Image (cartoon, rainbow, N blue to C red):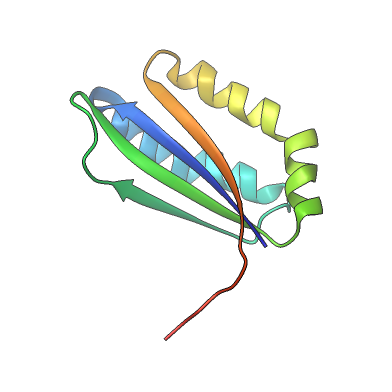
Amino acid sequence: MILYNVTVSIDKAVHLKWLDWMRTTHIPDVMKTGCFRECRISRVHGEEEGGMTFAISYVAPTQEAFDNYQENHATDLQEEHTTKFNGKFAAFRTMLTIIEEFSA
């Protein structure tokens, strides 16, 4: 499995609007691609002054599913985000391979 993490620092002045848009539009659009099986939004604590930081974590079942997302969907979805919140955010993307999972 692949964990695709997008860390976003968003201007405090627009963070509620951004969260609403992420929940109602962007994440549903990403999930509709069929490339991911789940998604979580987490708040990152200790953000810099003037912004709030969130981590959006998507789980792809295979490398092929993630590659499909990158090749066929990521550019358009990222452009939409940039257009809507241009100058109000910084994003950092990380792709991780899940080696093993544990649960209680």
Q: Which quadrant holds residue 79?
A: top right
Camera-side residue: 63 or 78? Answer: 63
When asked about the image quadrant of residue 72, the answer is top right
Indicate left or right for 52 with 103 as reference: left
Q: In the displayed structure, does residue 96 sit left or right of residue 24?
A: right
Q: Residue at x 76, y 53 (%)?
A: 63
Which residue is farthest bottom? Answer: 104
Instruction: Look at the image and tell me in which quarter the C terminus lies.
Output: bottom left
Q: Is residue 94 above or below residue 38?
A: above
Q: Name the outermost residue toward the front.
A: 99
Residue 58 picture location, percent across and down: 57, 52
Residue found at x 48% / y 32%: 92
- Left or right of 25? Residue 8 is left
Residue sitting at x 22%, y 29%: 48
Most extreme residue toward the top is 87
Is residue 96 positioned above or below 78 on the image? below
